[in-house]
Image (spheres, rainbow, N blue to C red):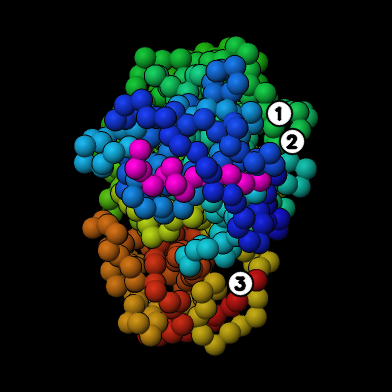
């Protein structure tokens, strides 16, 4: 895998020249920083020092004509530096900076540590410095990541876009980051795909392929949320925004996350949008003019929070509507619910009673689940954001925050009178299964053949442990992470999560990475995803009522 972004060159050792610049203080919250004459001629970036517990500083980057090049929000360091983030100069000659918060509590703005720690550099080091960075899950090289966006498959390549903050490891400055893979496991970073414009930041959306073109649909999040479109002529590497944006507007405050697909029966494009606590459906013949068709959601499922990131697709002879919700998850915070029914090109009709709620994953850390467009062999492959909005900004990493789940394939199964979505690890996970080993490692798969009652305990020498229990009589599976390691960063983190098994479980597959455990019933009836932050890897396993086989993951 390449170790560098095209726009951000990584080097093995960090080299940067500290800036010899003095802030021009215009007020207790307003500073201008002239950088043109002081930047070394080879400098590509100015490296901005970040302090995560500070308030946002709003920065306008101006060129030598005093035209704005870019606007960004950065938590500039006041009295300590947590890390640096790169801003590509691209002709910038002046930074106009407005601080927020009560400056009387912070001291004189001219004395802030950021002015002493700003650096110029022609490189930015992205080599890993994090104990908890996963070994086989997708992560950004640096910065913040949340929802997967616009995923599609084309010409043997899987494309993953994601909500990305290039200027800090907490949520802000939403753009579309981009990674590609030929095997769904190993990801190669690509340049930023979509950046904010005067319609707003770039929120979640989807991509479709049409001939040689890739068409992206996304939410422009400005004063109001509107839907926009962009077209790529180079397989999704770069996009040109449609001159007629926005293509759909609304007076609703929460109006976002367009997901577009082709509906064969009516020969039209369909867009499903999250609007407050319902989903709205639109149709189009040309992807530009959209007609409202119907809404779904009133009284159906869970309404504990805002509905987000929809997906609508056919599985077998039924249609599945994925509906991510925050808050309202089964154990607090964000989660993915779904509905099964029929879609006739105009209206989605749920086959379950309104109060029935079905969860795709019963862990705390599985959200914003969406599927790849045009996956081969008629597969329905999904990824999720592996975190929870209750504590996502506080998890114990700094260089980056958040990972995606392993890829999963969806299907259907029945239990009683209901139909459910099955979730199994994608077949690509078998390709990275290595040799059998005697002890768990920081990156492994554990296959456990279980009896009617089973207990699995993963632990380390520090006394940190994760306990999992299967109870065949009760039809339940649970995971207890209350003593899993560092749980101090949020009161919402230590928890026990429980899932129904919808029948007998014979085998469990557990995927362990440095900061996560994903548990699956081998038949796809149970999925549970939880983050963990042990001070050292779990290297001991004890199983009662079953037998474990441990495989390396290559």
x then y, percent, for residue 314: 56, 38
- Label 3 Cα neighbours within 10 Å, binned few <14 / some 14-19 / many ≥20: many
Disc 2 or 3, which lies upstream in sequence? 2
- Label 1 Cα neighbours within 10 Å, binned few <14 / some 14-19 / many ≥20: some
Q: From which residue to which does the magenta span run? A: 110-122
Residue at label 3? 553
- Residue 189 visible: no
Residue at label 2? 235
The foreground one among 84 and 185 is 84
Looking at the rendering, in which quadrant would you find the N terminus? bottom right
Instruction: Look at the numbered disc 3 and give the secondary structure of its residue.
Output: strand
x then y, percent, for residue 415: 41, 55
Outermost residue, bottom side: 438
Instruction: Look at the numbered disc 1 and give the secondary structure of its residue.
Output: strand
What distance separates the C-alpha of mark 2 from that of mark 3? 30 Å
Dot label at residue 366: none
Instruction: Look at the numbered disc 2 and give the secondary structure of its residue.
Output: loop
């Amino acid at each position: 895998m390449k170790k560098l972004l095209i726009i951000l060159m990584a080097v093995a050792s960090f080299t940067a020249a500290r800036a010899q610049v003095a802030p021009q203080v215009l007020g207790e919250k307003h500073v201008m920083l002239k950088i043109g004459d002081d930047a070394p001629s080879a400098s590509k970036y100015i490296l901005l020092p970040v302090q995560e517990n500070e308030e946002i500083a709003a920065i306008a980057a101006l060129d030598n004509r005093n035209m704005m090049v870019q606007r960004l929000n950065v938590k500039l360091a006041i009295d300590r530096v947590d890390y640096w983030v790169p801003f590509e100069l691209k002709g910038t000659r002046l930074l106009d900076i407005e601080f927020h918060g009560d400056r009387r509590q912070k001291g004189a703005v001219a004395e802030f540590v950021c002015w002493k720690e700003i650096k110029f550099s022609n490189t930015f080091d992205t080599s890993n410095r994090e104990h908890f960075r996963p070994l086989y899950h997708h992560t950004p090289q640096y910065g913040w990541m949340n929802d997967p966006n616009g995923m599609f498959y084309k010409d043997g390549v899987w494309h993953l876009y994601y909500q990305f903050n290039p200027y800090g490891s907490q949520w802000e400055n939403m753009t579309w980051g981009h990674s590609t893979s030929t095997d769904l496991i190993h990801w190669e970073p690509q340049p930023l795909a979509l950046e904010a414009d005067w319609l707003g930041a770039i929120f979640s959306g989807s991509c479709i392929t049409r001939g040689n073109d890739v068409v992206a649909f996304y939410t422009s999040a400005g004063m109001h949320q509107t839907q926009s479109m962009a077209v790529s002529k180079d397989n999704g590497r770069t996009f040109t925004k449609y001159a007629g944006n926005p293509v759909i507007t609304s007076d609703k405050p929460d109006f976002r996350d367009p997901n577009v697909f082709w509906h064969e029966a009516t020969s039209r494009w369909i867009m499903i949008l999250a609007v407050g606590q319902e989903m709205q459906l639109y149709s189009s013949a040309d992807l530009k003019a959209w007609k409202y068709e119907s809404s779904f959601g009133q009284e159906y499922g869970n309404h504990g929070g805002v509905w987000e990131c929809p997906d609508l697709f056919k599985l077998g002879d039924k249609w599945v509507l994925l509906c991510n919700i925050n808050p309202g998850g089964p154990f607090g915070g964000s989660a993915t619910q779904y509905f099964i029914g029929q879609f006739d090109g105009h209206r989605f009709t749920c086959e379950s009673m309104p109060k029935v709620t079905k969860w795709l994953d019963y862990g705390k850390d599985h959200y914003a689940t969406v599927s790849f467009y045009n996956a081969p062999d008629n597969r329905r492959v999904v990824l999720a954001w592996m975190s929870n909005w209750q504590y996502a900004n506080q998890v114990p990493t700094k260089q980056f925050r958040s990972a995606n789940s392993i890829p999963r394939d969806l299907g259907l199964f029945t239990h009683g009178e209901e139909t459910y979505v099955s979730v199994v690890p994608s077949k690509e996970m078998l390709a990275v299964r290595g040799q059998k080993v005697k002890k768990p490692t920081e990156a492994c798969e554990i296959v456990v053949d279980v009896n009617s009652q089973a207990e699995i305990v993963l632990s380390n020498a520090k006394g940190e442990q994760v306990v999992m229990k299967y109870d065949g009589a009760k039809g339940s599976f649970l995971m207890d992470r209350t003593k899993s390691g560092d749980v101090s960063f949020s009161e919402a983190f230590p928890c026990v999560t429980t899932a129904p098994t919808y029948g007998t479980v014979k085998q469990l597959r557990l995927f362990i990475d440095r900061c996560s455990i994903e548990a699956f019933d081998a038949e796809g009836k149970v999925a549970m995803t939880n983050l963990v932050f042990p001070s050292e890897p779990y290297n001991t396993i004890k199983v009662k009522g079953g037998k474990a086989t441990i495989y390396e993951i290559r």
